[in-house]
Image (cartoon, grey):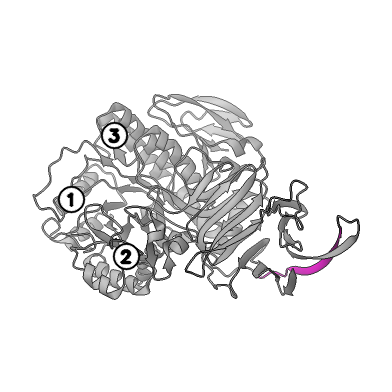
Amino acid sequence: MEFITEKNALICKRQGETLRVEAWGENSLRVRATMLKDFTGNDWALTEKVKETSAEVKTFDVTYRTGEGTDVDRTHGKIVNGDISCEVNFAGVMSFYKKDKLILREYFRSYDGTISRESRCLKIVNREWKGVQGSDNYKLKVRFDSNPGEKLFGMGQYQQQNMNLKGCTLELAQRNSQISVPFAVSSLGYGMLWNNPGVGQVTFGNNMTLWDMHSTKEMDYYITVADTPKEIVANYASATGYAGEFPEELMGLWQCKLRYRTQDEVLSIARKYKELGIHIDQIVIDFFHWTYQGDWKFDKKYWPDPKAMVDELHSMGIKVIVSVWPSVDRKSENFYPMLEKGLLIKTERGALQTYDYQGDCVEIDVFNPETSKYVWEVCKKNYYDFGIDGFWLDNSEPDYGVYDFENFRYIDGSALEVSNLYPQKYSRVFYDNMVKEGQKNPVNLLRCAWAGSQKYGNVVWSGDVPSTFEALQDQLQCGLNMGLAGIPWWTTDIGGFMTDDVNDPDFRQLLIRWYQFAVYTAVFRLHGDRGPYNIPALDDRDWGGGYLHTGQDNEMWSYGDDNFKIMKKYYDIRKELKPYIKSLYNEASTNGSPLIRTMFYEFPEDEKCWDIQDQYMFGEKYLVAPILHLNEFEREVYLPKGNWKLTSTGEEFAGERTVKVSAPIEYMPVFEKL
């Protein structure tokens, strides 16, 4: 092993591999390795200028006893940056320490260089490179020893019951309702970003942690240490960026359904809310208001004067957001011009098609700067110039017809190599251009994200999830882990997206419980695809704004007087919380803290809080205990250290104990920290 020391960096070369470990802000390191002659120079998520530090970098000899009983000196390398250090032995095996405590070590079981006192003859190495035939990329496996007592959180959004990810296998890929944001927070006091947008898999096993990439040019990750999860997230945000200032006028109710089909329908909904004295901050115009996918314009038959519509909505203080998909139908007026210019995703084999819902479509290549220019010019002319305030960037994974990532290619490389960055690039087609137009703090709605997406005005929602209590349980851990992965502006479809029957009393109970939960989240948005599908099409065309189905009504008054009263009560609670919610948004933009937080985020010293996943903190002040089961009208709540007031009754409780509280349909238990 050859060691080279530079200012703030340790470089190690062995058997054709170059390893670089360098200081990257306070108490943090960036680790890269490649089998190529140079690193790519891609910063990926690590885009921010971090605080300068002065790391100690050195080499030193360690004496080993050989099998023959003689002593041999071997050179090791070490870098110390504040409270974090990395030691690299003569075989290139890395060990990471927080102060003097080992927190992470590479898994290496291959004779000379093995640190473990277990088997060393397995010939399993820490970093395994295998060439991808026909390219200069590699399949890469990176292995770490596992601490079975460690708890791991973050990593984005996975539709499952496990908030603690220890023992889980996670696909590093974007899908509808699955969001890969590969930053993990450990109970051992460190956070780690897998700074690679390629498709792969990570297994946080009890015997080994394995990061497995299908096609990449280099290994790249960032590791940081701190005494609390809040400080870990703050370090991470300083390296990847902070969310912007969230507009105060969007902190209330967003009204949405699948789907408002006409200009008159949108206006009638807004007028009725106004008559009821209920202000909605934003109304959302969903998909297939257009002619063909990729035309990115209103169907004039049903939206004859969009500017007049927007002007009237603005006069009521309502912002307007419109759905834009990245799919372009072959029948679209933009398909062949974009195809000719090379602005669409390419397939490696077979037909040129990436998406097949309601059309024969190819999605746009958002990695190409010319795509951004083209799409924005169309959307500016057909939406933005009418006064549209924001864009609902749906299908932003992108939602492939089949997730055969090896079959798709962008201008920057194969989907296997960079596809997880797609939703962030898609958001910037609009965010960057809106900023250029002079808009302050643009806010757009997306179904997907990657590390660093928080910087680009992204409200991320959890995708097309079913209307079930099981899905509601999943959404809670999804939102908490998204927050720990650095995405603070997260939300869901209130009531879930896929509803079979709006008249089912079980669904209506679910809707109320979901609505109550949503009041105590970042964005309060009423949306869903409500069955049954018995509403006839507006016309018999097989295209345009009139042919596709729509869902049942989904406004506050759509579910009967009793439910309306509960929803209005919680609408008023949201309104009263606005100054507090504003303070939470401000905190997100200064230290990266999410609005909804795991219990251990606020109470890291309480061991019980590390195991709780059915309650959470809304900021530092409110403990929220959502109702997550059908016909559940009381529940147990764990109160950490301190004094707490139950907001429904004013009753006060001492902490460090579990209490049972009533939860009638009209009320979700919330405790205020005194």
Cα separation between marks 1 and 3: 24 Å
Most extreme residue toward the left, as rendered?
Answer: 540
Bounds of the magenta segment: 52-65
Place residue 643 in its image quadrant: top right
Residue 530: image location, x then y, percent? 25, 39
List the residue tagged with mark 3.
564
Element carrying mark 1: loop
List the residue tagged with mark 2.
364
Q: In which quarter of the image is the C terminus?
A: top right
Residue 212, placed above or below residue 346: above
Query: Of tags 2 and 1, which is closer to the observer?
Result: 2
Name the disc covering residue 261, or none. Answer: 1
Residue 123, placed above or below residue 18: above
Q: In the image, is residue 54 part of the stretch drawn in magenta?
A: yes
| Depth check, front residue: 356 or 68 | 68
- Residue 244 shows in this picture: no
80 left or right of 334? right
